[in-house]
Image (cartoon, helix red, strand yellow):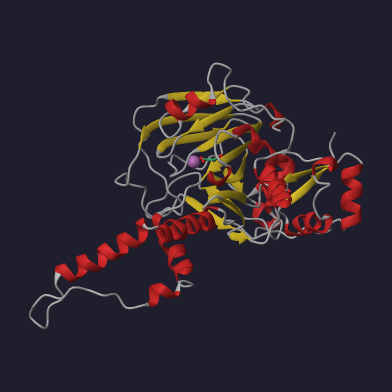
Amino acid sequence: MTSIPLCLPESITPEQFLAEYWQKKPLLIKQGLPQLIDMFEPEDMLGLAIEEEASARLLTQANTKKEGQAQWQLKKSPLTELDFDNLPKQWTVLVQNLEQWSPELGQLWQAFDFIPQWQRDDIMVSYAPKGGSVGKHYDDYDVFLAQGYGHRRWQLGKFCDQNTEFVADEPIRLFDDMGEIIFDEILEAGDVLYVPPKLSHFGVAQDDCLTFSFGCRRPNLMQIIDSMADIATNDSDLFVPMLLPQAMQASGALQTQSIEAIKNQLLQLLQSERGDHIIRQAVSEVVSKRQYDALMPEETLDTDELMQALLEGGTLQADYSNRLLYTQDSNNTVLYANGQRIDGLDEATKAVLIRLANGESLQHSDVTGIDPDDLSEWLENGWVWIDFAE
Ligand code: SIN
Ligand code: CO
């Protein structure tokens, strides 16, 4: 059951948002995510940025642009405290995949439950002192920009395309001309701005400021083709040489007809039941893959401690830095976790994993029918976490 309300204005239903705004136009949601207020302070994020396993980037901006020199400098993690000494006036540090460090923050994805879990990428924070920004740019994905601390002024401009030219020789994608400014507002903690893909945006910190980007993702065709090839490798029938009609032709020619005949066999395969199966598995594996390496929990509970924690009121929840999803294949529900199909599950265990994948918080009474060692393994794998909060 979702305990966090959806991040939408009262006047807009999820259906309306998906039909009218999603991938089409921006939306400001005043106090869309009040849970973020006071959740973190800038110091917390600076501490995280220098953690050994963090995916972080420090972006600094020279005060003046010198001829022939980049105005921006980018340093990727590992970052150390030294990197934060003698910074120019304007800088930003970005840390990706925050749900890995804070499942409580990851839980806020529930406010975006109208977007399927497999289209969620990660939560990134940007910390900047007054004046800091990452420049004018666009992204290829949808993003919900949620203000967590301080204030940021956001300007939105034109939609870009592949032909939009970026400023040359800079380490990040930037451009000068955002076209007509269609939005110009200062967001305060709790406010959320939805920005569709390719819409130019520019956010400037007005004071010490934390902005959390709830970013989305979708696979590209190359990833699917790649994964299909991997899956098809296990299908011995596909290694049988094809039968092809033969017409008289010059012996040196590879005729278009022959290529067409091969293409037709390929299309037939894709449109067959076997093809459905390969495509389904390829898509499921690709979209359930993690983008970042798993951070192994420093300490975990053993099976008895886990069951005790549940008995004492703790709840079991999917960990949003891991990817758990299910799909229907020939009337059979198949589960995937982090790019891998999970086989050999009994119906009761499947039912519990499906509820977790759907974002439910499960109590002790919800999991009594399944093997506690399974729960313990899920905890160890990082698929789930125990929330001790009331
Ligand atoms: C930021 O928070 O400063 C950058 C986020 C974005 O532009 O996508
Ligand atoms: Co952006």
- Image-based side of 176 in relation to 337, left or right: left
Mark yes or no: residue 278 visible: yes
Q: How many marks?
A: 0
- Residue 245: x %, y % from top left: 18, 73
Mark yes or no: residue 85 visible: no
Task: Quadrant for residue 257, please give it.
Answer: bottom left
- Residue 7: x %, y % from top left: 60, 28
Task: Quadrant for residue 19, please give it.
Answer: top left
Q: Residue at x 42, y 28 (%)?
A: 25
- Image-based side of 102 in relation to 55, left or right: right
On-image quarter of the C terminus: top right
Residue 263 lies, with reference to residue 200, above or below; the image says below
- Image-based side of 139 in relation to 291, left or right: left
- Residue 5: x %, y % from top left: 66, 27
Q: Nearer the viewer, residue 37 or 24?
A: 24
- Residue 138: x %, y % from top left: 43, 41
